Structure formats: structure tokens, C-alpha cells
Amino acid sequence: MEAEEVLTGGNVAAQVVRVGSTVRKPATFQTPFVAAVLTHLAENGFAGAPRSLGRDEQGRHVLEYVPGVLADADPGFSLSELTQVGRLIRELHDVMETFVPPADAAGESLIPDPSNGKLICHNDLAPWNLVRNDDRWVFIDWDNAGPSSRLWDLGYAAAGFVPFMPWGDATVDGPRLRALVDGYGLDEDQRQALPAQIAGHTRGMYDLLVRGSRTGEQPWARLHAEGHANHWGQAADYIEKHHDAWLSALLMDY
């Protein structure tokens, strides 16, 4: 067997290693569900997710290793790149419309969609989970896959990809949000609803971290101790404050 190389950067899974052209992750109760999702995506031609390759002799989940650079290590996305991200997320959601969850496995949403959506989504679409190379853009870390909705999932993605920062400038961030949404192809009613979904999911991330700090649940307690809740709470304040600016950007000349 080839040597194991420890991979860093993940917050949810325990030790993750690279072995040759594969990644090995400790199996959890979510693993059968994640494997089913990734198999469905591969069988339906979606290239934006790693392939699930079964289990190894230690029972770990074996996944395709995707070479490239994590998007959060690059400079901020251009408008055209944001449009490309939007198209990729739309393709993902469209393919997942035909997914039938296995009877013996279930996904779990850490920040439940208030509309009680049933579409199985990634639920952590962000630059830190996007690997880019010359051939593919691939979303990794599917541990949080579970029931959601298009707008709830896209709203979280917007928070990270625009990105919405506590010190942001709405005149800059509005066009960036518009580029992402144009790539996805939301209709007018969806554009009207999206800003509240962005704010709600961002606030939900803050609440998750605060709750983790009180209960000691990991990794949320650790992330709270590292100051991540401050970012998410202040980002939510900024998004809520400029709700009308986001609507104007999304609906102008639409």
C-alpha cells in the first residue's frame, strides 16, 4: 500500500489522508448516505464532485483524490468566475432532483432549511470546499449532505463566495451577488426571496457555533473558541442591514 499523507483543513471529519490517487476518510453514520449521493452524481455525469470508491481494509471511505488548489487560497473570484460557480451549483441541484435516498441511510442538516425542503444538497458550498484545476471545479467534503432547498443552499454559498464580510461594501457586493445568481438562473420570485435566505443561513451558522460553545459539541465549540462566531454574527448583521440593496442588485434590468 502507498504511503499515507495527512490532509489538513477539514473541520468535521477526523484524520483524512491521501493514498495515491485516493482520499481515505474515517467512516461515520453519514458515510453510506454520502456514498449514495456521490454515486448518483457520477452516474448522471456531474463532474463537480469526487467519485466514491467504496471502503478500504480499515473500513474508511475511499474517494477520488482531486488535484488542484482550494479556492479560498486564491484571490477573490472575478465576476465571470462567480457566474461559473452559480452554473455549477445549478447543475448540481438539477441532477439531485432525481436522487432517491436509500432506505437504510439518511442525511442530516445541521442548519435546517426553514421551508423544510426535501432536495438533498451539499449544505457547505464554499471556497474552502472547492478544488479547482485546469479541467474541473470540484466540491469536496460532503459530510453535511442532507435535506435542504435550492435557495437555502445557494444562500449559504453566496455568503462565502461573494463573500459577505462584516466590513463589506454593498455597492461592490451587490454586483458580485448578481453575477452568482445570474449564473444559477434564478427567476424573479426566487430573486425576491434569496436575500432573506442568505441572511437566515448566515445567522443559522452563528447560532450553531454559539450552541456548540454551550454544549461542548465539536467541532463547533472549538470553532467558536477560535472566533468564528464573531465573523458569522457580524456578517449576518451586514447582510440584514443591506437587504434592499441586494434586492436592487438582483432585480435591476431583470
Image: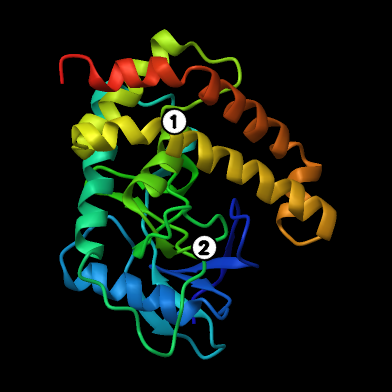
| Left or right placement of residue 242 versus residue 216 in this view | left
Q: Picture coordinates of residue 76 (x, y %)?
A: 42, 24
Report which quarter residue 244 is drawn in.
Answer: top left
Q: Amino acid at mark 1?
A: Asp
Q: Picture coordinates of residue 119 (x, y %)?
A: 33, 62
Q: Is residue 59 above or below residue 108?
A: below
The secondary structure type at the circle numbered 2 is: loop
Q: Which residue is mark 2?
A: 109
Q: Is residue 192 above or below residue 217?
A: above
| Left or right placement of residue 161 versus residue 133 in this view | right
Q: Picture coordinates of residue 169 (x, y %)?
A: 49, 11
- Residue at figure coordinates x 18%, y 36% from the top left: 187
Q: Dot 1, crowdedness within 10 Å: few (<14), some or many (≥20)?
A: few
Q: Nearer the viewer, mark 2 or mark 1?
A: 2
- Residue at figure coordinates x 15%, y 64% from the top left: 45
Residue 84 appears in the rendering: no
Sequence-first disc among 2 and 1:
1
> On residue 178, which mark appears?
none
- Residue at figure coordinates x 44%, y 64% from the top left: 145
Marks 2 and 1, how far apart in space?
A: 29 Å
Q: Which residue is mark 1?
A: 74
Q: Closest to the observer: 142 or 55?
A: 142
The secondary structure type at the circle numbered 1 is: loop
| Image quarter hosting the C terminus | top left
Q: How many marks?
A: 2
| Left or right placement of residue 203 versus residue 128 in this view | right
Q: Report if the CB atoms under discs 2 and 1 are less than 8 Å apart.
A: no
Q: Amino acid at mark 2?
A: Ser
Q: Picture coordinates of residue 64 (x, y %)?
A: 36, 68
Residue 197 appears in the rendering: yes
Report which quarter residue 98 is drawn in.
Answer: bottom left
Q: Is residue 18 above or below residue 60?
A: above
